[in-house]
Image (cartoon, grey):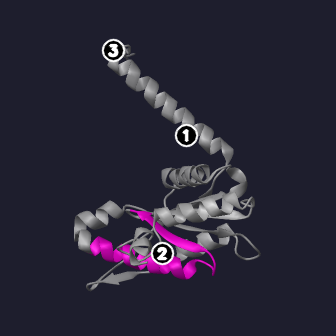
Amino acid sequence: TRLSREAQEDSLTGLPNRRRLMQRLESAFSSGNPESLILLLFDLDDFKGINDTFGHAFGDGVLVEVGRRLQRIAPESWLAARLGGDEFAIVGAASGDRDGLAIGSAALIALKQPIQIDGQVFQVRGSVGLCRGTAATTPAELLRNADTALYEAKRFDKGHLVEFTKPMHERAARRYRLGEALREALNADALSVVIQPI
């Protein structure tokens, strides 16, 4: 029905939304064969600057064009989705040349092509986090791991693709614990600053 379709569709780009993506992941995991699954998360670099400079209507035009390009890149039977904001995903089963690294690299190249909206021509860049089904035991974990890889891609050098590895999650957990410990120490006034003159 129209309502059920709208519940699984992004209203701006017409792509499947986060709910539809999660259904796809849950179906792959429940089938008992998630090993070939590949999830790519895309995030536009410095997209806030586009909205701040040209306005949100202009930014929406950029998102629509990015959605079109990722949909063209996604192999047949794969799913391209918009998760919200400037975050997109492509998910599917690897086979032959349908490998996540090749698809992610092709997407980065496609995103770099100039975009023309309302007479303005400019380029956008994106970062990509990739996670394979073998690195996750649940759909939520697969999404989390891909997001961790995306964070690494944006943290070190934007406009690149990074594949998830287990140490990435360990580093992210360590950073979180350290941040929490520092917040607790600040709230308890347990830090003292010592300056050593040179």
Which residue is denoted by mark 2 in the rendering? 111
As measured in the structure, the alpha-carbon distance from the residue carrying label 3 to the one carrying label 1 is: 26 Å
As measured in the structure, the alpha-carbon distance from the residue carrying label 2 to the one carrying label 3 is: 47 Å
Per the rendered image, the range of residues in magenta is 58-84
Q: How many marks?
A: 3
Q: Could you classify mark 1 by the number of other residues whose Cα lies within 10 Å: few (under 14), some (14-19), or many (20 or more)?
A: some
Amino acid at the residue labelled 1: Ala
As measured in the structure, the alpha-carbon distance from the residue carrying label 2 to the one carrying label 1 is: 28 Å
Badge 2 or badge 1: first in the primary sequence: 2
Which residue is denoted by mark 1 in the rendering? 172
Secondary structure beneath label 1: helix
Does 141 appear above or below 79?
Answer: above
For image coordinates 70% across by 70% down, the residue present is: 99
Amino acid at the residue labelled 3: Asp
Which residue is denoted by mark 3 in the rendering? 189
Q: Are marks 3 and 1 in contact (CB under 8 Å)?
A: no
Q: Could you classify mark 3 by the number of other residues whose Cα lies within 10 Å: few (under 14), some (14-19), or many (20 or more)?
A: few
**Which residue is nearer to you in this view: 86 or 189?**
86
For image coordinates 60% across by 42% down, the residue present is: 169
Badge 3 or badge 1: first in the primary sequence: 1
Direction from residue 148 to residue 51 in the image, left or right: left
